[in-house]
Amino acid sequence: MTTAVTGPVVTYGGRRPHALALVRTGLSEIWSRRRLARYLIAAELHKKGSDTLLGNVWWIMDPLLQMGVYVLFVSLVVGRAGTTADYPLFVFAAILPWKWFSSAVNDAILSVVARERIIKQVHFPKIILPVTATVSGVVNFAFGLVPLLLLMIAFYRERIAWTLVLIPLIAVVQLVFTLGLAIVLAAINVFYRDVGNVARHVLRLWFYLSPALYSAEQVSKLAGDLPWVATVFGLNPFSVLFQAYQAVIYHGTQPAWGALGILLVASLGLLVACMYVFQRVERAFAKVL
Amino acid sequence: MDDYSPPVDAPGGIAAPARPAHVRSGRATDLAIDAHGIGVRYNLRFTKKTTVRQSFAHLLRRREGPQHFWALRGVTFQVEHGESLAVIGPNGAGKSTLLQVLAGIIEPSEGQVEIRGHVSSLLTLGAGFDAELSGVDNILLAGAFMGIPDREMRRRLPEIVEFADIGAFIDAPLKTYSSGMRARLGFSIATAVDPDVLLVDEVLSTGDQAFRDKSRRRIEELIQAAKGIVLVTHDMGWVTTFCNRALLLERGQIIAEGDPAEVVAVHTDHMEQVRIEKEAEAARLRLQGVL
Ligand SMILES: Nc1ncnc2c1ncn2[C@@H]1O[C@H](COP(=O)(O)OP(=O)(O)O)[C@@H](O)[C@H]1O
Ligand SMILES: [Mg+2]
């Protein structure tokens, strides 16, 4: 063995990088650690049982059961006449992406604190934790499409349209939006450990304020001569997303591309801002955990 | 020991005079670690498991007590490749914090540290494992966390498994392991990765006697392989046998640095002093109770 040094030279401490450099570092760190990302996603899926057939049965059963509960409940309260035609399919089109969103947010919130011990032991880019937690949900979402197709083939064959192939495009917009939230919430949860509790309630409220169980048209009709209500309602990202999913799954029409495009741009902006916040506070994680 | 003087504001210990920052670059390349005026400040407002609720409660109450705490201040030293440095000191002196800085886990609040080469940290053994994953998966995951190329990790896999001596359990989930098995696995992962700089924090006393002997031999091998080592231990035998230099930390500052035997002597001396003071205090309190 010689004493020649071949390894890298790193410096800790000193001047702080500026905002854009921080975000750029975050991106390049994720890229250079894609192997770690892959292992983390595999570990996440393993834990949820998603790498076994039986584990995935639940991801298929769960949305179906949830849909059953909503359909039953809403039909009892509002009466069948008040609901949209083919109501189960309508509800299902929103439950599927929502389940992905809410579980991704919940997983991401815990993703950093769950790795507390390795964070205090090894130096690695922490941003990879909420990112992989969010991305691994894509697999579950994809599996959720199986019961959707089964449902459509069994009961709503006349509603099957080519627009179903647009689902991945809408999912990409949703993914970008989710990533931003997931990253910043994961960071906040290191400092305030009850973010998960708060998020759970906010998520529930959010779901009921979004056109999942009712349609956006019903809202504008109810709003009547208060057009700002419909406008505010439309600003909800999940108002845009749910309507897009409903368009391609339920109506068999193309989604409102304009609204989706705006949402994508806004989500990208949010993502960059959230990455900046994360990278900025990341250095304190090992001290606080 | 005339070496000992209470820490003053000037950074740096006794044997390592402070150098101006601009001399740093362009030095001899066999410096593995070049730490200059390191300080680490903990914010006492955010400690473990703060909640939003508590923070609101804090806002309402008046702030009292210090908001910050310097766990390290003005720590300057160098480690050359091939050297093994022991860091000793009483509990809470900042030894673990120092290793975390060297590993890049904690960003120093002030000062700079330059590390040449791959660092492997054995800070808390068995930590960072994923209980649901198998031993093999944990090895690969640990390698990925440490940034070691996957191919290299797979190449070293048999060696790691062999050294950890876990046998058939290697494919079982980690939650079925005993704490000794976890410790062995942690040790073999961290030492099998061929680091240029190895950081060890009070881990040598883990495991059974047989494994202790084995890990002792592994550390010896690493030292002989002329790699830089920073070793935190309470075992003064280790310090004098394996380290060619020692550094005494007290309350976040370097009190003494130099020959292991001499530094250990200072440390033992101080510990003795502390013990006597404590006893005197206890006696005083007893006396007060009587009166
Ligand atoms: N995360 C933390 N937040 C606040 N204070 C800390 C934290 N970690 C360590 N400390 C404090 O910093 C000091 C040094 O701790 P440490 O480096 O663990 O000492 P050692 O390893 O020498 O026993 C101690 O007083 C300890 O209480
Ligand atoms: Mg310690």
Image: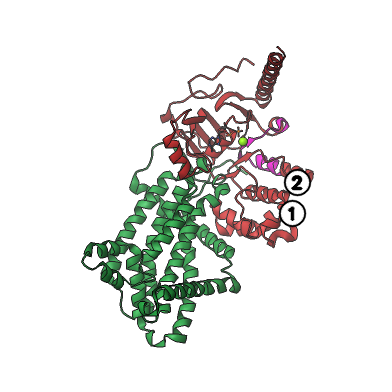
- Quadrant containing the N terminus of chain A is top right
Q: Is residue B166 left or right of residue B76?
A: right
Chain red in the figure, letter = B
Mark 1 or mark 2: which comes first in sequence? Answer: 1
Q: Chain of mark 1?
A: B
> Which residue lies under the disc numbered 1?
B165
Return the x and y of residue A276 as percentages of the image width and height.
Answer: 37, 49
The residue carrying mark 2 is: B211
- Name the element at disc 1: loop
Residue in the foreground of this view, choosing between A190 and A22:
A190
**From the viewer's perspective, is residue A205 above or below residue A14?**
below
Residue A186: percent from the left, percent from the top? 46, 52
Q: Is residue A263 above or below residue A72?
A: above
Give the distance between the C-alpha atoms of the residues marked 1 and 2, in whole angstroms.
Answer: 9 Å
Q: Residue furthest right?
A: B210
Q: At numbered mark 2, what does the secondary structure look like: helix, strand or loop?
A: helix
Magenta range: B218-238
Q: Is residue B36 visible?
A: no
Look at the image and say whether residue B191 sits in the magenta stretch.
no
**Is A46 on the left or on the right of B271, as rendered?**
left
Give the colour in which the image draws chain A. green
